[in-house]
Image (cartoon, helix red, strand yellow):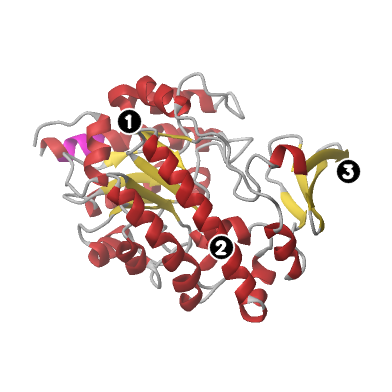
Amino acid sequence: MTKMARRERLMAIFQGQIPDRPAVKVWGVGTKEDGCVHPAFERVRDLAVDRTDLVRGVESRFSIYCGQENDQLVEEYEEPSDSPDWVDRTTIYHTPNGKLREVYRQSTCNKPGYLKEYLLKEPDDIKKLLSLPYKPYPFSSDEYRRVDAELGDAGIVKFQLDHTMYALQRIIGSENFALWSVDAEDLLLEAMETFAIRLRDHIVAAVGAGICGVFSWAGPELCIPPLMSPAAFEKYVFAMDKPLIDLIHEAGGYVWVHCHGKMKPVLRRFMDMGVDVLNPIEPPPMGDLTMSEAFDVVGDRMGLEGNIETHDFMVASNEELLKKIHETLEAGRGRRLILCPSSGYMENVNPSLREITNWLLYVNEAVRYAEAMSAG
């Protein structure tokens, strides 16, 4: 097969075709001007920009909860905590039916933060949220067009969307979301159906502005076993997402979805709802499918992206990482595969020499081996 340009290769995978070889991706890489949380990652970034199949995400300003009213009705402020390493960021929604408050503990040194207090604490808080007036922000395709032109043949742009279920789950929390799915499902569904309408209008605006490439979202992982049942996935993910996917496909676009976790119970349903590429397909023990097993299920009906855990870069020997790279690429021979780590390349703010060495090894060896497969 004739060698493809990087953009051509990635688009072939989204369009249901078999590319010249598996694509190789480093999640989070954009340009050599991107900032790094640690100087050691600059070498990884620069090498990946030069050699891997690039995927960059852009969006148009959007707030699924209150749109333009966000600027008038949402208040944010920071307060010091008991440690200089952390601050508490408080968000207040001033709804017609009363205040809603969220408190997020944020690191001052690039560490992961966490929610101390969820925005919605009782089922009736959903009514408060839905009482907010909603007017969408004016749509702009300027950033999309700028990044698309900047990438050229080096890669593709994903137009990033919020997610109907996740937009609600992330302001409730996993425990209460599960409990309310039993005790207050009518309110959950009312909120999700409202969000779905807003997302549909946002997609229509994107298409009307000439965006008809790859659309993307994250979040379904919060509604798969063991957090939620397969039945809940059907109601809150499949039923909500499929009409949006159909809308994107009807406009000539494609869909990329991010979902961590054990995929056996839901892999076929992602395929059935029309997802074009599913990420990140994690191997055991974090996931429950090897890439070969996942392709045995989906065949050529859906592209798959994964299957290297980000943790492996921190702990694996060179030999162990090489084995994982080769096995995954072989599983994707003649398939719609994008080799990719399970998350971004700068998750560790203080990387070891082993980690940086493994990232450089991944880029060089994955591209070399994939190109050799094509030549063979």
Q: How many marks?
A: 3
Residue type at mark 2: give it.
Met
Does label 2 or label 1 sit earlier along the sequence? 1
| Inter-mark Cα distance, 1 to 3 | 42 Å
Mark 3 and mark 2 lie on one chain; the one further toward the N terminus is: 3
> At label 1, which amino acid type do we have?
Gly
Q: Which residue is mark 3?
A: 81
- The kind of secondary structure element at disc 2 is helix
Is 297 or 253 nearer to us in this picture? Answer: 253
Q: Residues within 10 Å of mark 3 (few under 14, many from 20)?
A: few
- Asked whether residue 177 is drawn in magenta, I would say no
Q: CA distance from mark 2 to mark 1?
A: 33 Å
From this viewpoint, is residue 324 visible?
no
Q: Which residue is mark 1?
A: 155
Q: Which residues are magenta?
A: 368-373
Disc 2 target residue: 192
* Comes first in the chain, label 1 or label 3: 3
Looking at the figure, which quarter contains the C terminus? top left
Dividing the picture into quadrants, the one containing residue 120 is bottom right
Q: Position of residue 209 (x, y in %)?
A: 39, 33
The reply, left or right, for residue 217 in relation to residue 83 is left
- Residue sitting at 47 percent across and 48 percent down? 201
Disc 3 to disc 2, C-alpha distance: 34 Å
| Image side of residue 69 versus residue 222, left or right | right
